[in-house]
Amino acid sequence: MERVVTLLMALAVLTLASCGSAGLDYPREAALVNSNSDSYLEAELLGEDAISQQSKKDATIDRKIVKKGEIRFETADVNKTKSLIAQAVQELNGYMSTDNVGDYSNRLEHRLVIRVPAENFDLLLQNISESVDKLDSKNIDVLDVTEEYIDIQSRVKTKKELQARYAELLKQAASLDEILNIEKEMGNLQTEIESVEGRMRYLNDRIAFSTLTVTYYQTIASSMSLFSFSSEFRDGIETGWELFLWFIIGLSYLWVFIVIGIVIVTVIYSLVRRKKPKGP
């Protein structure tokens, strides 16, 4: 029993230590900041050769880059532009995750959110930009998430090692209370692992596929010549009929007052006729 309690305490300390190292609050898509501070102290403790080797190791790290961008432009034909973009996306093994269309009074606007393999992002952006006559805006963001990625990998590894130790400890448990306590800790640990692995999957998706938001619009002249007389006349008839029906409905609510008004006018008219002097 004492051995199991001692092992539980040791694992609890390891859990707190792993949580403490995992508690660093990294932004979800923050750029990596390379810190070269305390280089003199490192050189004193490790030597110049060690620093040189560490620098080479840092240079060989597989950088984890997330690319995303936005481009907005005007086009003469939204349908033709969409066909050209769709063809380019297909050729570059991408796909459209969002396709929105807006019909405004003076323009037709399309908004596409495109996911494309990271290595093809620049080529897609180049193909679209070359076909643009009037560019309104273009914004590109390149985010380095290497530090967060490495931290997540380390956290997953540590938590899985701790999970394996709990599994070994569970085999040695002698009482029901010990089994329940260990299973509770393993359940909490599994929840943490799933959460961290979910973040890892999200980063892998953003790293593998870049995101490009494309907004293009076609200006429409607001002139009455664009509308046919027949359609305008039909709309006028329909609107007029609706107004007439609403007028009848309004009268149906006021019929009592209308009747009273007619009675009052009739009485007043009769009294006036009686008072009027008759001719000789």
Image: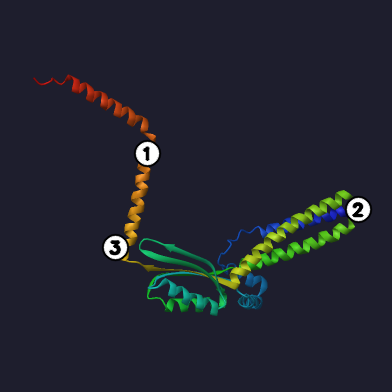
| Res. 91 visible in picture | yes
Marks 3 and 2: in contact by CB < 8 Å? no
Please, what is the three-letter code of the amino acid marked with disc 3? Met
Residue for point 36% across, 61% down? 105
- Residue 123 placed where, x, y %? 50, 79
Residue position marked by numbered label 2 in the rendering = 174
Say which of 54 and 121 sits in front: 121
Residue position marked by numbered label 3 in the rendering = 224
Say which of 169 and 86 sits in front: 86
Which quarter of the rendered picture does the C terminus lie within? top left
* Mark 2 vs mark 3, CA separation in Å: 89 Å
Point out the frontmost of discs 1 and 2: 1
Q: For the residue labelled by badge 3, is the local secondary structure a helix, a strand or a loop?
A: helix
Point out the frontmost of discs 1 and 3: 1
Residue position marked by numbered label 1 in the rendering = 250
Q: Is residue 190 above or below residue 208?
A: above
Specify the label residue 49 is tagged with: none
* Mark 1 vs mark 2, CA separation in Å: 85 Å
Q: Is residue 271 above or below residue 226?
A: above
Marks 3 and 1: in contact by CB < 8 Å? no
Please, what is the three-letter code of the amino acid marked with disc 1? Gly
Q: How packed is label 2: few (under 14 Cα within 10 Å), some, or many (20 or more)? A: few
Please, what is the three-letter code of the amino acid marked with disc 2? Ala
Q: How packed is label 1: few (under 14 Cα within 10 Å), some, or many (20 or more)? A: few
- Residue 145 placed where, x, y %? 59, 68
Q: Earlier in the sequence, mark 2 or mark 3?
A: 2
* Mark 1 vs mark 3, CA separation in Å: 34 Å
Q: Is residue 186 left or right of residue 233?
A: right
Q: Residue furthest left?
A: 280
Among the 4 quarters of the image, the one containing residue 255 = top left
Q: Is residue 221 left or right of residue 212?
A: left
Q: For the residue labelled by badge 1, is the local secondary structure a helix, a strand or a loop?
A: helix
